Image (spheres, coloured by chain):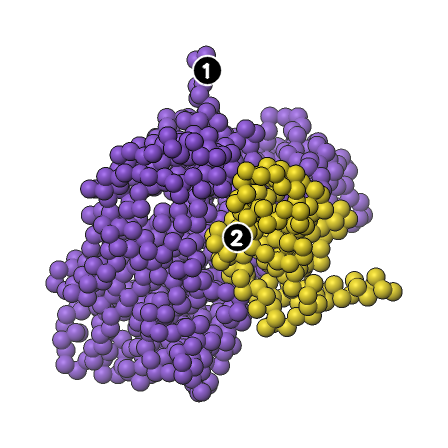
C-alpha cells in the first residue's frame, strides 16, 4: 500500500503531472468495429487523466485495472461529471503505463478503489474544468464567474454564447493549474452523470468479441506456452522426458525450470512452447516428470477436519478478549448456546484462466535487458516491485500493458503465472503467451481458506446477548496462520457484545490461500449471522429486534473511520430490508420462509433477506433475495446493481455446492464437472435498495456477498426448522 | 496433420492443423479469432459456443476435422458492416456484462435460441442457456436482454415485411 504516490503531496503531484510540457500529443486509436484503426486525431492533454481531442471526443484514462467490477466506467464518470463533459463524448482507456507518480494508485482490491480515487478523480475533472473556463473567459471576453462548463462546452449563462471544449483546449492547456485547495466540487443536486446508469465503456468490444483480454494477446512472432508443476505444491523437479516432448507436433522447445519455492513467485516446473495452445496442452499429456516430493505438500482436508473436531479451547491462543467472558459463561442465571460451524476451501474459478504474455529481450551491445509484458493483474505496481526484486529490472526496463481481466475476485494478485511466462520467453528468446488450462487454474489456486468454528453465545435472563466465545480453527501455511485468517477485532459482532473471547487454533495445511471476494468476511458472516439467529430463536425473540438491540444507539464506532461500523447506517439497512420484505409480518408456511442477515465490511453496510422454499426432497428454491445497501451516493447505478446481483449469485453458487478438498497435497476438484456452479435456471430474483446517504461513496465488488449465505441458512431454518451449520449445502443433502 | 477448409463468418479459410485439434483452438490460434473463449475445455461452461451450420455447439469439444467444409459463425460474425445484431444491442442496452468473458458464448446461445423460438418464456431461456455459465452472475440481465431482443427482433421483422 506504500506507493511512492502517497509520500508526495497532492499539490506536488499536480505540479508534476497536471500539464504536459507543451504542444500536442497524439491520441491512441480505438479499436472499432469493422476497421482496424481509427484515424489519428490531434489532441491536447489537460492533465494526466484528461485529453481533449480535436474531434470533440474527450479521452479519460482509467488507472485501476478492470476485472468486471466496473471501475473503468465509474472512475471516468466522476472525472466527466466534474469536468462538465457530456458522457456521449467520453472515450475511456486504460492508463498506457504503470507509473504511480503520474497516475496515483493503479491497483484494485478490497472494494476500496472507488473510495481511494474519489477525491483524485474529482480534482482531475475540476482542475481541467477551471482551465477550460479560464480559456473561455479569455477567448469570449466574459468574466470567468459568469461561465459554466456543461455538455462539453463552456457556456455564458446570460447570453447563451458558448465554445466547445475542443475549441478551448489549446488555450486551456496554457492556463495556470489551479491550487487543489481552491477547487469547488459540484454539489450532488447538480449531478448529471453520477447516479445514472451507464453501460460499461467496453460493452461494444465485449459483445462483438473484439474485447482484448490477456488471453487474447497477439504479438508478432509469439509462441504459445504451458507450464506443468508438481500436483502437490512444493515438489522439486528431478527430470523430465524433454527429448520426447520436443519431437511432438507443434512443439518448438521444452525446458526444465527451477523456481524459488514460493508458490506466489516461481515454482519448479516444465515449460513447453509451441505454435498453438492446443499443441502444448496435448504434448503435456505425454510428459513424464520425476518429482522429489519430500518437501511437497501433504495437505489433507480429512485430517484437518479430524483435528478441528478434536481441537480444544485449552490449546488455542486468545486473540480477542473483551469484558469477563468466563464469569458470564458460568453464571447459572444465563443461558449458554453452543454450535459447531464448518466451511470449505473454495476456488476463485475466474472464467478466464490464468495467463500472461511476455517478451523478454536480452540487451545487446551493453544495452540493458527489456521486458514487455501483457499482464492481467489487479496490481501493476506490485508486479513492478517483483520485476525489480526477482529479475533486477528497473522501471525503464519494463513496458507493462495492463489487460482487462475475465474475472479476478482477488486471484490475480500473485506473480506465479507472470514469472512462468517470463521464464519461457527468456529461454526461447521469443514472445510467449502462457495459458493455464482450467485444471491448472483450479489446482494452482490461492484458495479461500476453509475452517471451523466452535462458538458459544451467552444470553442473560431477559434474552439479551451478553457473551460471545468463539474458537476459530483454521489452517496454517507453512507454520503460520493463513491469509487473513482472523479473527478480526473490528468485525461485527466482536465490537457489539460486552463480553467477548475469540481464540485461534491452527493446523498445518500446505495449500496456498489468498484473497477471495470479501476475505474472512465471506465465512465469518455465515458463522456469526447464522449463530445470532440461533441465539434469537433460543431466546424466543424476533430476529430483527435482536439485531437492532445489538446495534444499540445510532453512532459511528470510530467517527471518520470508514472501516468502523456505523450503527446508524446498520440500523438503516436492517429496517429498510425488513420493511420492503414485510419480514416481521410474513410467517413461514408451506416450507417457505424468510431469512435475514446483516454484515458490515469493506466500508459497506448491507442487509439481505432471502425468500426460500425447501421441498420434501430437500430441493431448494431461492424465490428472491432482497438487499438494502448503504455505500453512500451511487456512482453508476447500473454498475452498482450489477455488483450486488453478482455478489448474491456468487454467494449462492458458492454456498450450494462448492467445495475444494485435498488429500496428499493434491486438489481433488480440477474442473467444472466436479465443482458445481450456479446456472441460470437456479438464479433467484433480486431486488436492491440503495440508501444513498451523504457519506463518501465506497465500493461494491465484495460487501453484498457475505450476508447471502446466512440469509439463506436462516431462511431454510424458517422454512423447515432445520439448522444449516455447514457449507456447502450439498454436504447436508440439499440440492438446488 | 490435415488441410481444412471452413467457412467462417462467410469467408472461406483454408489452413493446416492437427485433425484432433478442437475447433476452438483453430479459431483462436490459427485463424486469430479470439472472440470465442476458452473456459473449461470439457463442454461445461459454454464460453466457446459458436454456430455450426446455424446450430450452437461447444467448439472446445469438436475436432476441427468435423467442421471441415461446414459453416461456422463466431461472435465476430454476428454484426454486419452496418449494424449490430439485436441481441448485441440488447446486451449493451441492459449493460449485461461484468467481466464479460462468458458473454460471447452467452450471446451465441441466445441468438440460436431466438432463431428457433422468437418469443421464448423464462423457462425456455433457462433451458436453452443452462449450459452457459457466468462466473460473475449476470443471469438476471441475460434473461431480460433476451426478452428485449426478442421484442426488437419482432419489431424489425414487421418493419421488413411492411
Ligand atoms: S470451453 Fe468449451 S464449454 Fe467450456
Ligand atoms: S460476465 Fe464474467 S463470466 Fe459472465
Which chain does the residue under circle 1 lie in? Answer: A
Image quadrant where one finds the N terminus of chain A:
top left
| Image point (17%, 82%), residue name | A333
Q: Say which quarter of the image contains residue A519.
A: bottom left
- Looking at the rendered structure, the number of numbered marks drawn on it comes to 2
The residue that label 2 is drawn on is: B61
| Image point (66%, 67%), residue name | B147
Q: Say which quarter of the image contains residue B1.
A: top right
Along the line of sight, the residue nearer the viewer: B58 or A81: B58
Outermost residue on the front side: it is: B2
The purple-tinted chain is A
The residue that label 1 is drawn on is: A364
Specify the label residue A446 is tagged with: none
Q: Using the numbered discs, state the Cα–Cα distance from disc 2 to disc 1 in whole angstroms.
A: 45 Å
Q: Is residue A368 left or right of residue A169?
A: left
Q: Position of residue A643 (x, y in %)?
A: 51, 59
Image quadrant where one finds the C terminus of chain A:
bottom left
Q: Position of residue A600 (x, y in %)?
A: 39, 63
SS class of the residue under badge 2?
A: loop
Mark 2 within 8 Å of ligand 1, using the beta carbon = yes
> Color of chain B here?
yellow
| Image point (79%, 64%), residue name | B157
Outermost residue on the top side: it is: A365
Q: Is residue A198 visible in this depiction of the protein?
A: no
Q: Is residue A500 left or right of residue A120?
A: left
Same subunit, labels 2 and 1: the answer reads: no
Which chain does the residue under circle 2 lie in? Answer: B
Outermost residue on the left side: it is: A314
Amino acid at each position: 500500500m506504500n506507493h511512492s504516490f502517497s509520500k508526495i503531496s497532492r499539490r506536488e503531484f499536480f505540479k508534476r503531472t497536471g500539464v504536459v510540457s507543451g504542444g500536442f500529443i497524439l491520441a491512441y486509436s480505438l479499436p472499432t468495429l469493422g476497421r482496424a484503426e481509427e484515424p489519428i486525431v490531434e489532441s491536447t492533454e489537460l492533465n494526466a487523466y484528461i485529453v481533449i481531442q480535436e474531434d470533440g471526443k474527450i479521452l479519460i484514462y482509467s488507472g485501476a485495472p478492470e476485472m468486471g467490477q466496473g471501475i473503468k466506467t465509474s472512475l471516468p464518470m466522476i472525472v466527466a461529471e466534474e469536468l462538465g463533459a457530456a458522457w456521449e463524448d467520453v472515450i475511456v482507456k486504460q492508463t498506457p503505463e504503470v507509473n504511480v507518480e503520474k497516475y496515483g494508485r493503479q491497483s484494485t482490491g478490497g472494494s476500496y478503489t472507488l473510495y481511494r480515487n474519489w477525491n483524485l478523480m474529482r480534482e482531475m475533472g475540476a482542475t481541467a474544468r477551471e482551465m477550460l473556463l479560464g480559456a473561455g473567459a479569455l477567448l469570449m471576453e466574459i468574466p470567468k464567474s459568469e461561465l459554466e462548463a456543461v455538455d462539453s462546452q463552456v457556456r455564458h449563462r446570460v447570453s447563451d454564447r458558448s465554445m466547445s471544449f475542443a475549441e478551448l483546449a489549446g488555450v486551456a492547456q496554457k492556463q495556470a493549474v489551479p491550487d487543489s485547495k481552491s477547487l469547488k466540487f459540484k454539489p450532488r443536486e447538480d449531478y448529471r452523470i453520477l447516479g445514472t446508469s451507464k453501460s460499461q465503456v467496453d460493452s461494444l468490444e465485449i459483445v462483438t468479441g473484439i474485447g482484448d483480454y490477456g488471453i487474447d494477446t497477439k504479438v508478432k512472432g509469439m509462441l504459445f506456452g504451458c507450464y506443468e508443476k508438481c500436483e502437490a505444491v512444493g515438489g522439486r523437479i528431478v527430470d523430465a522426458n524433454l527429448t520426447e516432448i520436443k519431437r511432438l507436433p507443434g512443439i518448438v522447445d521444452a525446458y526444465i525450470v527451477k523456481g524459488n519455492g514460493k508458490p506466489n513467485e516461481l515454482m519448479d516446473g516444465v515449460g513447453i512452447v509451441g505454435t498453438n495452445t492446443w499443441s502444448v496442452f496435448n504434448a503435456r499429456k505425454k510428459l513424464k516428470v520425476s518429482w522429489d516430493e519430500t518437501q511437497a505438500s501433504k495437505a489433507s482436508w480429512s485430517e484437518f477436519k479430524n483435528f478441528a473436531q478434536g481441537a480444544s479451547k485449552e490449546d488455542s491462543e486468545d486473540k480477542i478478549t473483551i469484558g469477563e467472558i468466563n464469569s458470564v459463561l458460568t453464571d447459572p442465571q444465563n443461558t449458554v448456546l453452543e454450535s459447531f460451524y464448518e466451511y470449505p476451501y473454495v476456488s476463485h474459478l475466474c472464467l478466464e484462466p490464468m495467463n500472461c504474455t511476455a517478451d523478454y529481450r536480452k540487451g545487446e551491445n551493453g544495452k540493458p535487458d527489456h521486458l514487455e509484458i501483457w499482464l492481467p493483474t489487479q496490481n501493476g505496481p506490485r508486479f513492478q516491485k517483483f520485476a525489480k526484486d526477482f529479475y533486477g529490472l528497473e522501471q525503464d526496463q519494463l513496458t507493462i500493458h495492463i489487460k482487462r481481466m475475465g474475472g479476478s475476485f482477488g486471484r490475480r494478485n500473485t506473480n506465479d503465472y507472470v514469472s512462468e511466462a517470463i521464464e519461457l520467453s527468456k529461454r526461447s528468446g521469443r514472445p510467449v503467451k502462457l495459458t493455464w488450462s482450467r485444471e491448472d487454474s483450479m489446482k494452482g489456486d490461492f484458495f479461500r481458506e476453509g475452517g471451523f468454528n466452535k462458538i458459544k453465545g451467552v444470553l442473560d435472563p431477559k434474552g439479551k446477548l451478553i457473551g460471545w466465545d468463539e474458537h476459530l480453527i483454521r489452517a496454517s501455511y507453512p507454520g503460520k496462520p493463513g491469509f487473513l485468517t482472523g479473527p478480526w477485532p473490528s468485525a461485527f459482532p466482536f465490537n457489539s457484545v460486552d463480553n467477548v473471547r475469540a481464540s485461534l487454533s491452527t493446523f498445518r495445511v500446505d495449500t496456498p490461500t489468498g484473497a477471495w471476494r470479501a476475505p474472512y468476511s465471506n465465512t465469518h458472516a455465515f458463522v456469526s449471522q447464522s449463530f445470532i439467529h440461533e441465539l434469537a430463536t433460543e431466546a424466543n425473540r424476533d430476529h430483527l429486534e435482536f439485531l437492532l438491540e445489538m446495534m444499540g444507539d445510532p453512532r459511528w464506532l470510530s467517527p471518520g473511520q470508514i472501516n468502523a461500523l456505523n450503527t446508524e447506517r446498520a440500523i438503516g439497512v436492517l429496517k429498510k430490508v425488513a420493511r420492503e420484505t414485510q419480514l416481521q409480518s410474513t410467517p413461514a408456511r408451506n416450507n417457505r420462509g424468510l431469512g435475514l442477515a446483516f454484515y458490515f465490511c469493506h466500508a459497506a453496510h448491507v442487509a439481505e433477506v432471502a425468500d426460500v422454499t425447501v421441498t420434501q426432497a430437500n430441493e431448494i428454491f431461492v424465490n428472491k433475495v432482497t438487499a438494502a445497501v448503504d455505500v453512500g451516493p451511487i456512482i453508476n447505478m447500473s454498475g452498482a446493481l450489477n455488483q450486488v446481483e453478482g455478489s448474491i449469485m456468487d454467494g449462492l453458487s458458492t454456498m450450494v455446492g462448492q467445495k475444494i478438498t485435498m488429500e496428499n497435497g493434491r486438489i481433488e476438484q480440477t474442473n467444472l464437472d466436479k465443482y458445481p456452479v450456479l446456472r441460470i435456471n437456479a438464479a433467484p430474483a433480486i431486488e436492491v435498495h440503495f440508501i444513498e446517504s451523504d457519506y463518501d461513496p465506497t465500493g461494491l465488488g465484495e460487501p453484498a456477498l457475505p450476508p447471502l449465505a446466512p440469509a439463506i441458512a436462516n431462511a431454510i431454518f424458517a422454512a423447515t426448522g432445520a439448522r444449516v451449520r455447514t457449507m456447502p449445502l450439498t454436504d447436508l443433502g440439499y440440492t438446488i | 496433420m490435415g488441410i481444412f477448409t471452413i467457412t467462417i463468418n462467410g469467408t472461406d479459410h483454408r489452413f493446416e492443423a492437427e485433425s484432433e485439434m478442437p475447433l476452438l483452438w483453430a479459431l483462436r490460434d490459427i485463424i486469430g479469432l479470439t472472440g470465442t473463449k476458452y473456459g473449461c475445455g470439457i463442454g461445461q461452461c459454454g464460453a466457446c459456443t459458436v454456430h455450426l451450420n446455424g446450430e450452437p455447439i461447444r467448439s472446445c469439444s469438436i475436432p476441427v476435422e468435423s467442421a471441415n467444409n461446414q459453416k461456422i459463425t463466431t461472435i465476430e460474425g454476428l454484426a454486419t458492416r452496418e449494424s449490430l445484431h439485436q441481441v448485441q444491442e440488447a446486451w449493451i442496452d441492459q449493460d449485461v456484462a461484468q467481466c464479460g468473458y462468458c458473454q460471447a458464448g452467452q450471446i451465441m446461445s441466445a441468438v440460436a435460441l431466438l432463431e428457433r423460438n422468437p418469443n421464448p418464456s423464462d423457462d425456455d431461456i433457462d433451458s436453452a442457456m443452462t449450459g452457459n455459465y457466468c462466473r460473475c452472475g449476470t443471469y438476471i440481465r441475460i434473461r431480460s436482454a433476451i426478452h428485449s431482443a426478442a421484442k426488437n427482433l419482432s419489431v424489425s421483422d414487421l418493419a421488413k415485411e411492411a
